[in-house]
Image (spheres, rainbow, N blue to C red):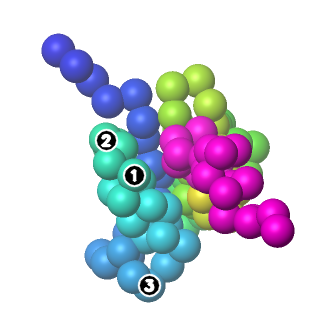
Amino acid sequence: MNETRRVLYRCGTPTNFLCPCGAVARRLKKNGLEFRTERVRRRRSARPEIVELTKQPYVPVLVDGEEVVGDSRRILQYLEWRYEEDETPASASASSGSV
């Protein structure tokens, strides 16, 4: 059985367009990355699993294998660094055009 090792802990907002958690979910889908979604309780004091992972009660939190990343901006930066293709040096120098 192939179990997804990527888990997104997020708020209960039912859409991906109203909160930072949704921005992370959209990026994961855009990058074609499989992930499991875990909705957390609304009350921050009732999120022991999040506190255990990050030492704070806020979401979103992405668990990617052994990596745990909190905060939507940091997660988006992590995904860009880890999974998006970099521009190749040859195409970068060709676009700068030396005369």
Q: Is residue 76 visible?
A: yes
Q: Do the residues under discs 1 and 3 have CB atoms within 8 angstroms?
A: no
Q: Position of residue 14 (x, y in %)?
A: 30, 76
Q: Residue at x 59, y 39 (%)?
A: 82
What amino acid is found at the position of numbered circle 1 in the picture?
Asn
Q: Tell me if residue 25 can be seen.
A: no
Q: Amino acid at mark 3?
A: Leu
- Secondary-structure class at tag 3: loop
Classify 10 Å Cα crowding around label 3: few (below 14), some (14-19), many (20 and above). Answer: few
Q: CA distance from mark 1 to mark 3?
A: 20 Å
Q: Quadrant of the C terminus?
A: bottom right
Does label 2 or label 3 sit earlier along the sequence? 3
Answer left or right for 56 relative to 78: right
Q: Nearer the viewer, mark 2 or mark 3?
A: 2
Q: Which residue is mark 3?
A: 18
Q: CA distance from mark 2 to mark 3?
A: 22 Å
Q: How many marks?
A: 3
Give residue 71's mark: none
Residue 97 on the magenta segment? yes
Q: Position of residue 26 (x, y in %)?
A: 39, 65
Distance Cα–Cα, label 2 vs label 1: 9 Å
Q: Would you call the spot at circle 1 few (<14 residues within 10 Å), some (14-19), or many (20 or more)?
A: few
Q: Nearer the viewer, residue 37 or 27?
A: 27
Comes first in the chain, label 1 or label 3 = 3
Queried whether the magenta region covers residue 47, the answer comes back as no
| Point 27% across, 23% down: residue | 3
Closest to the observer: 89 or 4? 89
**Looking at the rendered structure, which numbered label has been put on residue 34?**
2
The span picked out in magenta is: 77-99
Q: Residue at x 17, y 15 (%)?
A: 1
